[in-house]
Image (cartoon, grey):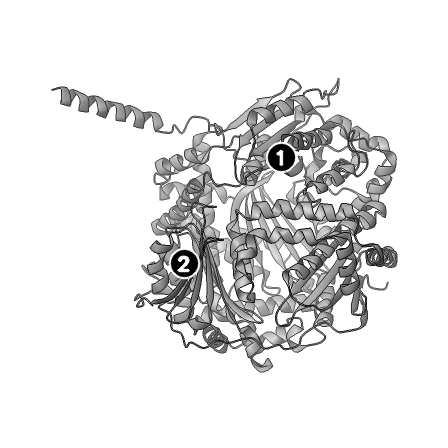
């Protein structure tokens, strides 16, 4: 009797627990309990979440609910300008001292330290180390300086005008001209169309100082701001710092109302046709505008999942059309998402083949109508559910290994959109309870809500050269409601049940070697294939791999080069094993695995990743790449036709960027056939059957391959799988190498001017290149010199001259086909400033050759490298890249954990020697893009 009572009590308790855990769809979504949400007395909001990935690091954000939409008419562009000014002098960091301080601590300007301004918000981003409390407190002070203490020095404002104007200059061209005509229509005449964040050049150039200060005073205030902090720290200490540095900031005595602007839903349909002389292709954009659907309640979350399932299914259908021998468009998509302000939108997008806009648009409209009329199928829905569920499950498995950046970005969105961030336990529970309950009838009913005849905006953006053959706005509107008359229901083909019909016989291991210092095990199979294994716990559900072999397309003569160059695309387009590409996508629903095989210039490579559960699936895909490559003639024909059509469009209307890039390619390749820009005429030389034959040849000998695996696996448990799918591959025991085709830049001094485009903008590219003696220390010196030059030219060309927005300098090396180095220096600027800025650039190079780099710049580089190195040592991608490269180059892999010691060799004298050795100017190329002569 007691046992019966006990069992009844236990059953009752279980029922109560189950009932308590059942999620009520009417309830509001709960904030992740790991997030501390608070508000200071002045109205500043803060979000704090402890997260230990990566260790000793944090992500800090200052978020302001103020962007370009709040500008007065005389301030257009000043919200973005104000963002710039926060890096040019604050109360405790005059002039450029803030950037100097942060870069000395390894936080690189641009790559790490950055900000953005949009219509409705401004966000400052600061990833920081947290290894010392004193530094962490000073980083928090930086956020407070941005929030309220910009000095807005008049001289600094005037200097920054030029930088922002150069940023504006970079954006000018066909896209900006099209945007000016398009946005008033898309934004339905709202103020958004008149408040692009980049603003107006005239205002940027001439705005009174008081206009900048007025924007700062009105909108940089605590009751519109939030601090978001996620990372490896004590949340109580962070909360105290926020109170200390932000608590004393005051709101204006009479704050301006923060109006929430909206894009009106006017009903009906608007259409516009826009052409431009530098627009190379024709595309249509159709927006079905809808009221914004925020995720406030659990029921909102359920509806959001339904739209995700819709997106997945419609995308699959549109992608299948690309597999035809004559695809109806270059690219097509249909996707429901957040739009702007108070709106969401179903956005339909299609890039036409040539000028056949009608076919492209009607095809995507037909697919929308097919879904609206007949709905999706049960099998499509089940695959979409599996895919959605696998994504959530993977996040759940990585819940203690999720990077802080993922959390911080979501919390920024929480503040801006007045929503919450649920934790992954809730998300996983929600999926388990509610995903299967979503019925096909509900999805099909949702489609009819998304695809309506109201609040539609249709835009055709086309090439000026096709203007005569493009449809009118009236024709576009007519097509919208006159499609789908001949459509039939979608037929979903059966999904394959396996990738490999018959498992191969496992190969034997002939040798095994353990490298205890770095936790790597090397295995060689009897077929000659070598495998290097490094188990890690950096991620709970991730395995990554790469296999390489020397050879590539260098082993083929020029007559077969095009077939070799396109062999990878043909193979990928054809699917995997017996499955065509569309069949493969369906088969992979719910699985987390991807494999990519490529034939490059000197190597053939196969890389991929998978979850722990789907590791065998990934290996099966690898096995098929070696043993079962079947050409899909229709898909290959369609892919090649689309590529050819794309190139014909670009040749018909060559953009300034394409003309410049093509010129660079020709010069740097010294006229070699294989270094020529791709053309539609060259595409005619591709024979899909020959291309697939070449691809199969490059992957028919496993003896020549070396694979590296990194991730969460047990070596003994995966050995049988490796023995089956890698050890069981055919091998000839022969080893190949590549051919050196001597395709290198010309020697001596080369200068070329390219003239294309009508905008008042120029591009500059300077290169130094030549041979070097390969070793890791020398390669570090070359890379360091490039990065240090980047620091110096940012200081000189941007901060002092106000002549560029973002210069780029990189020093790189390649050991194959021959050891060569290259320094590339590039930037956009005014045509009037080209010669002056080049002269300054060369002068700075001469200074380093004479005196070496400044110690402070070396300090910045070293700090950045050490900070990154500490994080990289706990990263699967870093270990995979380092191990694979060292094994391929024959370097010692045991040095990987101590590579940062090479930084000790970097001195003022070493940079001087490196500059004199590699920046002599004897082999110097200068290419400049200028506007066409008027």
Answer whether labels 2 and 1 touch (C-beta < 8 Å).
Answer: no
**What whole-number distance in Å separates the C-alpha atoms at marks 2 and 1?**
37 Å
Residue 353: horizontal and vertical position, in percent?
58, 64
Residue farthest left in this picture: 1
Dot 2 falls on a residue whose secondary structure is helix
Residue beneath disc 1:
60
Residue 685: horizontal and vertical position, in percent?
57, 78
> Which quarter of the figure has residue 680?
bottom right
- Please give the name of the residue rendered at 61% of the width and 25% of the height, measured from the top-left corner: 45
Q: Is residue 608 above or below residue 153?
A: below
Mark positioned earlier in the residue sequence (2 or 1): 1
Residue beneath disc 2:
618
Dot 1 falls on a residue whose secondary structure is strand
Residue 522: horizontal and vertical position, in percent?
43, 61
Q: Report whether 282 appears left or right of 24.
A: right
Dot 1, how many residues are within 10 Å of its Cα: few (below 14), some (14-19), or many (20+)? Answer: many
> Which quarter of the figure has residue 922?
bottom right
Q: In which quarter of the image is the N terminus?
A: top left
Question: Can residue 168 be spotted in the picture?
Answer: no
Dot 2, how many residues are within 10 Å of its Cα: few (below 14), some (14-19), or many (20+)? Answer: many
Residue 381: horizontal and vertical position, in percent?
38, 48
Q: What count of labels does the image hold?
A: 2
- Please give the name of the residue rendered at 55% of the width and 59% of the height, measured from the top-left corner: 331
Q: Report whether 66 appears left or right of 517.
A: right
Q: Quadrant of the C terminus?
A: bottom right
Q: In this view, does 812 lie above or below 203?
A: below
Question: Can residue 722 be spotted in the picture?
Answer: yes
Residue sitting nearer the eye, 460 or 533: 533
């Amino acid at each position: 009797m007691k046992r019966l009572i006990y069992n009844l009590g236990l059953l009752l308790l279980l029922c109560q627990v189950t009932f308590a855990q059942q999620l009520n769809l009417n309830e509001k979504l709960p904030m992740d309990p790991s997030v501390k949400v608070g508000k200071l007395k002045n109205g500043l909001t803060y979000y704090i979440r402890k997260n230990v990935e990566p260790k000793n690091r944090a992500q800090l954000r200052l978020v302001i609910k103020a962007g370009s939409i709040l500008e007065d008419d005389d301030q257009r562009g000043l919200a973005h300008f104000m963002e710039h000014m926060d890096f040019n002098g604050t109360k405790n960091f005059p002039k450029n001292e803030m950037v100097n301080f942060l870069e000395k601590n390894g936080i690189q300007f641009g790559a790490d330290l950055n900000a953005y301004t949009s219509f409705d918000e401004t966000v400052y981003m600061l990833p920081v180390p947290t290894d010392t409390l004193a530094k962490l407190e000073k980083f928090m002070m930086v956020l407070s300086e941005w929030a309220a203490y910009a000095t807005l020095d008049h001289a600094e404002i005037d200097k920054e005008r030029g930088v922002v104007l150069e940023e504006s200059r970079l954006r000018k061209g066909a896209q900006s001209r099209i945007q000016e005509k398009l946005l008033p229509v898309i934004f339905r005449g709202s103020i958004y169309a008149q408040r692009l964040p980049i603003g107006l050049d005239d205002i940027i150039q001439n705005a009174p100082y008081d206009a900048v200060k007025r924007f700062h005073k009105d909108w940089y205030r605590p009751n519109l701001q939030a601090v978001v902090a996620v990372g490896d720290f004590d949340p109580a200490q962070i909360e105290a710092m926020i109170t200390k540095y932000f608590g004393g900031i005051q709101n204006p005595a009479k704050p301006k109302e923060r109006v929430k602007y909206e894009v009106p839903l006017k009903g009906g349909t608007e259409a516009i046709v826009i052409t431009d002389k530098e627009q190379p292709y024709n595309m249509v954009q159709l927006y079905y505008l809808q009221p914004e659907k925020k995720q406030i309640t659990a029921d909102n979350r359920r509806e959001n999942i339904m739209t995700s399932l819709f997106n997945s299914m419609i995308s699959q259908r549109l992608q299948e059309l690309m597999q035809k021998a004559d695809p109806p468009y270059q690219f097509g998509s249909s996707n429901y998402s957040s739009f702007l302000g108070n709106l969401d939108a179903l956005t339909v997008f299609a890039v036409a083949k040539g000028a056949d806009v009608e076919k492209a648009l009607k095809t995507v409209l037909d697919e929308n109508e097919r879904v609206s009329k007949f709905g999706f199928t049960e099998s499509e829905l089940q695959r979409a559910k599996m895919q959605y569920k696998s994504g959530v499950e993977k996040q759940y498995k990585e819940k203690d290994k999720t990077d802080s950046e993922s959390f911080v970005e979501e919390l920024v969105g929480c503040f801006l959109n007045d929503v919450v961030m649920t934790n992954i336990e809730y998300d996983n529970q929600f999926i388990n309870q509610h995903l299967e309950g979503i019925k096909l009838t509900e999805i099909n009913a949702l489609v009819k809500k998304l695809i309506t005849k109201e609040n539609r905006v249709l835009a055709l953006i086309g090439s000026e050269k096709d203007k005569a053959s493009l449809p009118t706005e009236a024709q576009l509107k007519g097509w919208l409601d006159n499609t789908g008359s001949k459509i039939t229901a979608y037929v979903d083909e059966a999904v394959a049940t396996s990738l490999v019909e018959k498992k191969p016989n496992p190969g034997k291991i002939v040798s095994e070697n353990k490298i205890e210092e770095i936790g790597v095990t090397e295995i060689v199979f009897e077929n000659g294939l070598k495998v290097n294994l490094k188990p890690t716990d950096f991620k709970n559900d991730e395995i990554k791999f790469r296999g390489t072999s020397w050879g590539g397309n260098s082993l083929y003569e020029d007559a077969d080069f095009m077939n070799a160059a396109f062999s990878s695309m043909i193979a990928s387009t054809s699917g995997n094993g017996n499955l065509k590409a569309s069949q493969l996508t369906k088969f992979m629903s719910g699985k987390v695995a991807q494999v990519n095989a490529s034939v490059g210039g000197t190597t053939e490579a196969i890389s991929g990743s998978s979850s722990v559960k789907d590791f065998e699936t990934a290996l099966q895909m690898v096995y098929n790449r070696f043993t079962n490559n079947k050409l899909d003639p229709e898909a290959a024909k369609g892919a090649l036709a689309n590529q050819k059509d794309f190139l014909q469009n670009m040749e018909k209307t060559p953009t300034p960027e394409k003309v410049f890039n093509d010129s660079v390619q020709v010069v740097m390749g010294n006229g070699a056939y294989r270094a020529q820009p791709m053309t539609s005429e060259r595409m005619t030389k591709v024979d899909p059957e020959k291309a697939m034959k070449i691809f199969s040849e490059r992957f028919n000998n496993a003896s020549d391959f070396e694979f590296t695996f990194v991730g969460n696996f047990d070596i003994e448990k995966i050995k049988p799988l490796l023995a089956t799918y890698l050890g069981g591959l055919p091998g000839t025991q022969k080893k190949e190498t590549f051919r050196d085709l001597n395709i290198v830049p010309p020697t001596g001094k080369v200068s070329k001017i390219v003239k294309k485009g009508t905008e008042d903008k120029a591009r500059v590219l300077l290169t130094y290149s030549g041979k070097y003696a390969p070793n890791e220390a020398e390669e570090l010196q070359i890379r360091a010199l490039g990065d240090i030059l980047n620091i110096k030219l940012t200081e000189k060309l941007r901060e002092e001259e106000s002549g560029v927005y973002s210069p780029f300098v990189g020093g790189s090396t390649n050991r194959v086909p021959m050891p060569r180095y290259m320094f590339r220096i590039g930037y956009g600027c005014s045509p009037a400033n080209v010669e002056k800025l080049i002269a300054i650039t060369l002068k700075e190079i001469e200074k380093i050759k004479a005196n070496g780099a400044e110690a402070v710049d070396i300090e910045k580089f070293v700090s950045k490298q050490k900070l990154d190195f500490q994080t990289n040592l706990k990263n699967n991608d870093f270990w995979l890249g380092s191990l694979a490269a060292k094994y391929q180059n024959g370097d010692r892999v045991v040095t990987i954990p101590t590579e940062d010691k090479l930084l000790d060799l970097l001195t003022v004298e070493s940079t001087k020697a490196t500059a004199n050795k590699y920046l002599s100017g004897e082999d110097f190329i200068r290419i400049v893009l200028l506007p066409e002569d008027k």
